[in-house]
Image: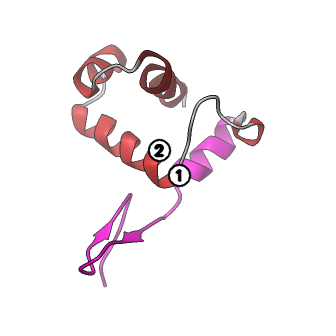
Amino acid sequence: MRKLREFLRLNFEHKLSARATASSLSISPLTVQAYVSRIRVAALSCPLPAELESDAALTRLLFAEVCVVKTGGRLTGPRCVSS
């Protein structure tokens, strides 16, 4: 969870590129893209609201099973599964 909070700091406060963020946190650029996608779906902004101060609450919000249906019927978003 520490990397997730650090990711949010680098993303919101320092506005690092995906590549620089990935390098700084020793994660893959694909993980950075996935986190950015989850942040957009959750509509997060900085500073985080008080109810997201706990790591558990932040994890529940960002890693919930969420799908967004776009025009054309494509499922997008974290962990979308088409049946």
Expressed as whole percent of the image width and height from the top left, the position of residue 23 reads 27, 17
Instruction: Report whether 83 appears left or right of 5.
Output: left
> Where are the magenta residues, as a range?
55-83
Residue in the picture at 39% in, 41% down: 35
Where the C terminus falls, by quadrant? bottom left
Expressed as whole percent of the image width and height from the top left, the position of residue 28 reads 25, 31
Where the N terminus falls, by quadrant? top right
Expressed as whole percent of the image width and height from the top left, the position of residue 59 reads 58, 45
User: Label 1 crowding class (10 Å Cα cut-off): few <14, some 14-19, many 20+?
Assistant: some
Instruction: Report whether 83 appears left or right of 9.
Output: left
Residue toward you, 23 or 47: 47
At label 1, the amino acid type is: Ala
Residue toward you, 65 or 70: 70
Expressed as whole percent of the image width and height from the top left, the position of residue 55 reads 65, 36
Q: Which residue is mark 2?
A: 39
13 in the magenta segment? no
